[in-house]
Image (cartoon, rainbow, N blue to C red):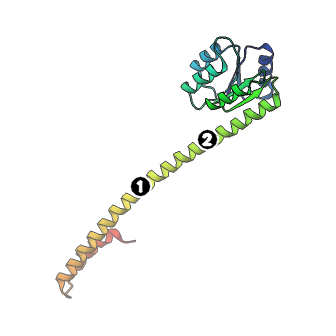
Amino acid sequence: MKVLCVDDDANARTVYQGLRKILPDDEISVVNSGEEAVAAVDKAHYDIIISDLQMHEISGIDVLRYVKKVDLTTEVIIVTGFGSVDSAVEAMGLGARDFIEKPINILLLIEKINKIREYQLRIQEIEEYRQVKETVEEQAGRETHALEKRLQLMQTAINEAIAILEQLDGKADAAAIETLMAKLTPFKI
């Protein structure tokens, strides 16, 4: 997963950089301002953005709003300080997936990242299932159409054979039987 961590606090950035060792399979990027976050989002897709709420110039709320305009699939975790739970609740209303308070508890942050990872995997599985379902439905539709066409041809051949039998009025000759066989043989199972 690609994770972008945004914080103007050097201590928080150190914590985020530590995520690289704890989550070595993930691509962790760390920037120190909302401006840098917006620039990074313009250049690449991120699965998760962890953003401080209170930053100079462009706040965490501004980053969240921008991210959700660019890519609704990117999940955002807001980091709050100073007991600003009300702002975190506002962020959740704007589309943030979760929030965490400072000082950052690295284990709690990893748990939140892993929950998002599981959520995104489920979304991906659902999308793959939907695509398989569409493919199967399309194939079934084509096969149903082919069967309906074959059934129509069979019905026509049967109707023609019945008409020939009715004309014979019980007097079947070899030519009539050959004609009947020619009409019905393609449908022999």
The earlier-in-sequence mark between 1 and 2 is 2
Report the residue at 53% width, 46% height from top.
130
Q: Quadrant of residue 170?
A: bottom left
Q: CA distance from mark 1 to mark 2?
A: 27 Å
Name the amino acid, label 2: Ile
Taking 144 as reference, is 59 above or below it? above
Residue named by callout 2:
123
Q: Quadrant of the N terminus?
A: top right
Q: Farthest residue to the top: give it.
A: 57
Q: Residues within 10 Å of mark 1 (few under 14, many from 20)?
A: few
Residue 153 seen in render:
yes
Q: Which mark is residue 128?
A: none
Report the residue at 60% width, 15% height from top.
39
Taking 18 as reference, is 158 above or below it? below
Q: Nearer the viewer, mark 1 or mark 2?
A: 2
Name the amino acid, label 1: Gly
Q: Position of residue 188 (x, y in %)?
A: 36, 72
Residue 174 seen in render:
no
Residue named by callout 1:
141
